[in-house]
């Protein structure tokens, strides 16, 4: 199996159709390059935003910008954990995630926006370290999450698409 085949975009049978929304948000490019550069793009998009503005709710949205970044952190950890488990051959089915209780559990007004972005960056770097050392056969391994089969490859690409999906919404909100 070639490295290009390992890192190719996932095919429809590798993930539940729900994740197609996120995968459609992934631009052309190599997986590792996209994973490596993405958080600096988030930092760039939000660099001029004051902490006060990031803590404000912009109707009709239900989360502040800080809460959105908190959700990105939670999802990065979750998708990374799924990739780690399935990549290591653990086929134990994993539950879904109701994102709202996660966001509601944290008072994001107490953390500065740059600190949240740093946490997102640290979490991404951890996921990247794992994915870089993943042996080629592991990319095709499947597990079950939220009652649906998914490959490690799909999870890696979803990491990129999920952030792009939410950051497109954020850019609309603040423009």
Image (cartoon, grey):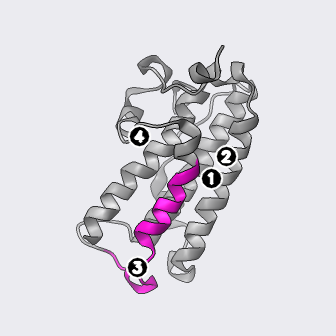
Chain-order first, disc 1 or disc 3: 3
Q: Which residue is mark 1?
A: 124
The residue labelled by disc 4 is: 26
Q: Secondary structure at mark 3?
A: loop
Chain part drawn in magenta:
36-57
Q: Nearer the viewer, residue 21 or 33?
A: 33
Whether the magenta-drawn stretch holds residue 104 is answered as no
Q: Mark 2 and mark 4 in contact (Cβ < 8 Å)?
A: no
Question: Residue at coordinates 48% horizontally, 27% vertically from top-left?
Answer: 9
Q: Residues within 10 Å of mark 2 (few under 14, many from 20)?
A: many
The residue carrying mark 2 is 127
Instruction: Work out which residue is located at the far top of the displayed protein and give it.
Output: 1
Distance, label 1 to label 2, CA atoms, is: 5 Å
Callouts 1 and 2 close, C-beta under 8 Å:
yes
Question: How much space separates mark 1 and mark 4, taking CA atoms?
Answer: 16 Å
Disc 1 or 4, which lies upstream in sequence? 4
Q: Of the numbered discs in the image, which one, if any, rests on residue 49?
A: 3
Q: Main secondary structure of the magenta part?
A: helix
**Of callouts 4 and 3, the N-terminal one:** 4
Whole-angstrom CA distance, mark 4 to mark 2, is 17 Å
């Amino acid at each position: 199996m070639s490295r290009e085949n390992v890192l190719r975009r996932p095919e429809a049978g590798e993930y539940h159709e729900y994740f197609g929304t996120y995968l459609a948000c992934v631009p052309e490019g190599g997986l590792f390059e996209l994973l490596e550069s993405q958080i600096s793009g988030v930092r760039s998009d939000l660099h001029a935003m004051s902490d006060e503005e990031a803590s404000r709710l912009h109707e009709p949205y239900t989360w502040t910008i800080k809460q959105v970044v908190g959700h990105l952190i939670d999802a990065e950890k979750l998708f990374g954990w799924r990739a780690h488990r399935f990549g290591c051959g653990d086929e134990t089915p994993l539950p879904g995630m109701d994102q709202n209780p996660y966001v509601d559990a944290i008072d994001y007004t107490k953390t500065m926006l740059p600190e949240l972005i740093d946490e997102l960056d640290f979490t991404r770097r951890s996921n990247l370290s794992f994915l870089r050392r993943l042996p080629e056969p592991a990319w095709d391994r499947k597990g079950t999450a939220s009652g649906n089969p998914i490959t490690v490859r799909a999870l890696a690409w979803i990491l990129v698409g999920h952030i792009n999906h939410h950051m497109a919404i954020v850019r609309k909100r603040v423009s």
